[in-house]
Amino acid sequence: MLIEKEVSELKVGHFVVKIIQQKGHFALTSAGHIKSKAVINHLKSKNIYRVLIDDSKTLVPKNIDSDENSIMNNKDLEHAKAIIDQSKSIQKKLFEDALKGNCINLSPVVNIVNKSIDAIFNSPDSLSCMLNIREKDEYLFEHSVAVSIYITIFSRYLDLKRDIIEQLSIGAFLHDIGKIKIPDAILNKPGKLTDDEFTIMKTHANHSISIIKDTSGISELSLEVAALHHEKLDGNGYPFQVKADAITLYGRMISICDIFDALTATRVYKKGFAHNKAFAILRELGKKNQLDANLVDHFIRCVGVFPIGSLVQLESNKLALVKARNDKDPTNPHVQSFYHVEQHQFINKQEINLAKSQDSIVKGVSAEEFNLDMGKIVEMILMEG
């Protein structure tokens, strides 16, 4: 039987005959079965809305845990790492141009943002994983890259339109560019800023707005999301003390993404919080009416109880990297063990679906707690064998 279905209704095993509705001119090479969730995400990324399926040819996958379809392979991770590295290079050039007073070239930003969006649609967890396992040694550049990726992941979770996601991601990519105007002694001060220093630090938001306004080709939405990233619902944010009703959905989203990355990032003078601690802080800010509490809950569900790329300690006294979420059982994701805590040594990697294992997670941890180099862990994870 031929049936029309929304792309969001497609499942692995459906036999797609043809495209019924889309925004664009994408063409199927041939009719065929949906073999993975990545195929569905690819159709969504091409702005395809409805398709025709032949229900009589639907296959029921055998011996397949539906969550395993989202497990990343090394190719996905290597591609994600390349995107983050390229993003950091573009950030450095943007900051150099802003410091010299040169006009910002938006073209490379649009290009890399769309690479990120495609990667997130096709392999949703790969970029999220790389954010967590990246070597955090250049916070100034990495933070804007991370916030851009987080808002893209969050936007996809909220099912926003592709063109909206692109504009939000561009705004997030540029949101902190004004920090290049802040003296290094204040920007990189190890410790709490004085009131006077904090007053100067807050001016980075004004500098960002001015630089973005002068950027040719920038959209109003990209400017809006960058301008609102430090505003709070209670009106005590900056630079303009915008209050709740005037803070749009997009402004509320970026403030959550911005704070989350700042909390979890490790810097020279500060270790990042574990994800569960960062989630608790976000929820507390929601209770204080600084962040949108409902959106905070959505963000936590979007990122996951144990986010992709985070480290966990198992009951077996092994450390493991979270490789894929398990939506049916969020506290038991797919992990890859690599280190024995008692033996203080790396062990052969083992893929474990905790939902089907007697092992379980004791707690989320950081590499620093065990004097481990996250860079070496990344190298090991990306190596075959």
Image (cartoon, rainbow, N blue to C red):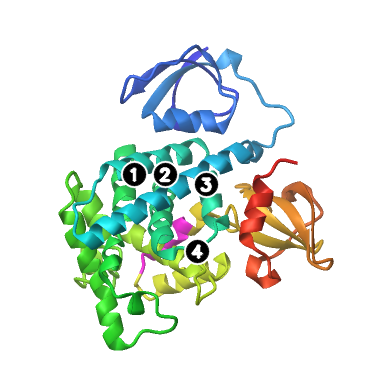
Residue at 35% in and 63% down: 255
Q: Position of residue 210 (x, y in %)?
A: 17, 61
Q: Are marks 1 and 3 in contact (CB under 8 Å)?
A: no
In this view, the residue farthest toward the front is 100
Residue 377 image point, x, y percent: 66, 56
Which stretch did the figure color magenta? 291-299
Q: CA distance from mark 4 to mark 1?
A: 28 Å
| Contact (Cβ within 8 Å) of mark 3 with mark 2 | no
Which residue is disc 3 drawn over?
A: 81
Given contact means CB atoms under 8 Å apart, are the residues at marks 2 and 1 in contact?
A: yes
Q: Find disc 1 in the rendering and name its residue.
A: 165
**Residue bearing mark 2:** 156
SS state under label 3: helix
Could you tell which of marks 2 and 4 lies nearer the N-terminus?
4
Name the kind of residue labelled 4 in the image: Asp
Amino acid at dot 2? Arg
Work out whether mark 4 precedes mark 3 in sequence or the reverse, and give the earlier one: 3
User: In this figure, which residue is indicated by the disc labeled 4?
Assistant: 137
